[in-house]
Image (spheres, helix red, strand yellow):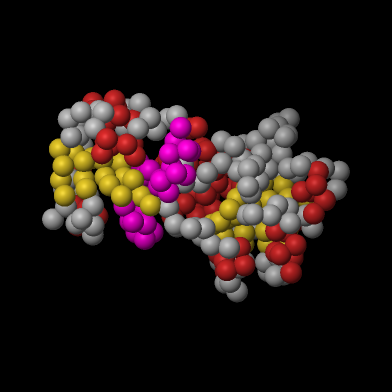
Amino acid sequence: MSQLVEVTEAGDPRLADYVQLREVSLRRLLEEEHGLFIAEGDKVIRRAAEGGFVPRSFLLAPRWLESLGDVLAQWPETPVYVVSEELAEQVTGFHVHRGALGSYRRTAAAPLEELLTPAVRRIAIFDDIVDHTNVGAGFRAAAAMGVDLVLVTPTCADPLYRRSIKVSMGTVFQVPWTRLESWPGALGVLKQRGFVSAALALTDESITLDELAARNDERLALIFGTEGHGLKPHVLEQADLTVKIPMAGGVDSLNVASSAAVTFYATRKPAARQ
């Protein structure tokens, strides 16, 4: 039986994990200090559980106790704070969609070499993408198009920030990923493992996405840069190829998450094309 705890005061210290969820700087400090992340919504809470993450607590409106009962039953010692949706809004600083939140423990990131198993054929690298929505959408596209591994550079936004998780629909728990310690030095490691690195960029040397897809590289790492200025010159110098998506209508670029989705589909593994 879950530990149901009715809470009626916004200042209750037991709700500290859920305070001011929209304050990015505050949340980064709190989540790093306590090693936690927040899952929002019943589907995301369920996917976090399926991904093997251990909950610290749950914050639920009464109407979710029954439908999430099987998830709560997995963790009978974990407190379930039952609150009104109005109180949830006071604590978090915004209207909590669906009135369901879970606080989960982060796990230590695996080193790159450990993740580069023989089964990994397609890698996405998100470099310095600062918008959490774009990070989440990128992960969702990676999961949908069969990308085996996602790597984020040291300056990329946190894939486990609440907004990233929500936009990804919990697929950040589904696709293996890690944060690189050396960038673009990690491209040397990938090259040694047989990966061709392809950077999405508009340069005079860029081949088209169709040309990249026609190569049918066995192992391919796709690199996507920050929303404003794209990839830095020193990253492009280290990549094996630069690639562009031909466009019509006078459009010269797509949102980075849209570019990623198009590229993942075009370069999906041969078995996935059948």
Using the image, determine if residue 185 lies above or below residue 158: below
In the image, farthest residue toward the right: 204
For residue 85, which quarter of the picture? top left
Residue 96 on image: x %, y % = 31, 32
Residue 119 on image: x %, y % = 57, 72
Q: Residue at coordinates 75% horizontally, 62% vertically from top-left?
A: 188
Q: Residue at coordinates 70% horizontally, 64% vertically from top-left?
A: 190
Residue 52 on image: x %, y % = 36, 60
Asked whether residue 30 is drawn in magenta, I would say yes
Q: Residue at coordinates 70% horizontally, 58% vertically from top-left?
A: 186
| The residue stretch that appears in magenta | 26-55
Q: Which is more toward the observer, 175 or 24?
A: 24
Describe residue 264's horizontal placement relative to residue 109 as left or right. right
For residue 257, which quarter of the picture? top right
Q: Which is more toward the observer, 79 or 70?
A: 79
Location of the C terminus by quadrant is bottom right
Using the image, determine if residue 188 lies above or below residue 48: below
Residue 177 on image: x %, y % = 54, 57
For residue 173, which quarter of the picture? bottom left
Describe residue 249's horizontal placement relative to residue 265 as left or right. right
Asked whether residue 28 is drawn in magenta, I would say yes
